Amino acid sequence: MAARLAADGRYEAVFGVSRSGRAPDGVTGLQADVTDLPSLEAAAAAVGAPVDLCVVASGVLHDGFQPERSWRALDADHLRRDFAVNAMGPALAARAFLPLAPRERRAVFAALSARVGSIGDNRLGGWHSYRASKAALNMILKTLAVELARTHPGLICVGLHPGTVDTALSEPFQKGVTPDKLFTPDHSATCVLGVVDGLKQEDSGFVFDWKGERIAE
């Protein structure tokens, strides 16, 4: 997404914040950890200028813990880890970067969520930590949207479901995914940014998939 935004040229500057600090050509790399507020605040201070688009793309699914197949696998450390990265991380990013958002003109604050975070769409069970952390993220985004409507009337706050993307995060779980539903990172970025372009003020507080369709709460 950062590379596409830089190539598009509509923004004066594009910043990529990550633990490594690396960024593609045309993007200014900044180092921060989404679970560490001081590092996020330092990155925000380095950006400095008003931010018209902020996308929090952090997330964790396995990496030491496998998604639970049953409630019998529930584990406190697993729950803490998923909530720290998937829910608290974007919340801390919001605290650090929302002070840079313009108050009147259109701007977007978005975080990558997931369809499995939908309470209304949950028909399979399992994946307790990941589902619950994404559901918590969706509530955080809704709460931000309600508050920001009073202070930043042009700001849109949403969750974005990028689909199943062919990355290390989804790799162990791709077996049942048909080729037409397994997206390259480039294709997903194109779709997600297209959704961002089409967002309206009344969309604030909700979660949308890569097609721009609203996901059940």
Image: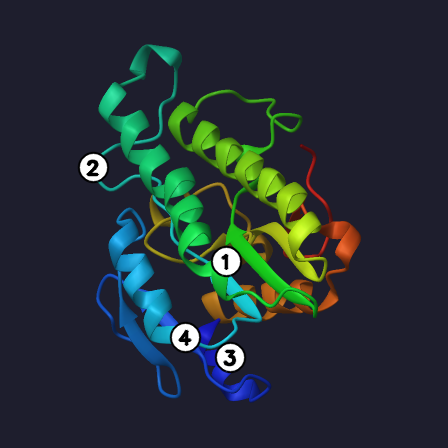
Q: Nearer the viewer, mark 4 or mark 3?
A: 4
Q: Residues within 10 Å of mark 3 (few under 14, many from 20)?
A: some
Indicate the secondary structure of the residue bearing disc 1: helix
Image quadrant in which the C terminus is located:
top right
Q: Amino acid at mark 1?
A: Leu
Q: Which residue is mark 3?
A: 4
Q: Amino acid at mark 2?
A: Gly
> How far apart, in angstroms, are the residues tagged by discs 3 and 1?
22 Å
Q: Which residue is mark 2?
A: 64
> How far apart, in angstroms, are the residues tagged by discs 4 and 2?
36 Å
Name the one closer to the observer, 106 or 167: 106
Q: Which residue is mark 4?
A: 48
Q: Residues within 10 Å of mark 1 (few under 14, many from 20)?
A: many
Q: Give percent across and percent down for residue 178.
A: 55, 49
Judged left or right of residue 48, residue 195 is right
Q: Nearer the viewer, mark 2 or mark 1?
A: 1
In the rendered structure, find residue 98 and report the number of the disc placed on it: 1
Among the two numbered marks 3 and 1 on one chain, the one whose residue lies closer to the N terminus? 3
Q: Give percent across and percent down for residue 207.
A: 64, 45
> How far apart, in angstroms, are the residues tagged by discs 4 and 3?
22 Å
Q: Amino acid at mark 4?
A: Gly
Q: Nearer the viewer, mark 3 or mark 1?
A: 1
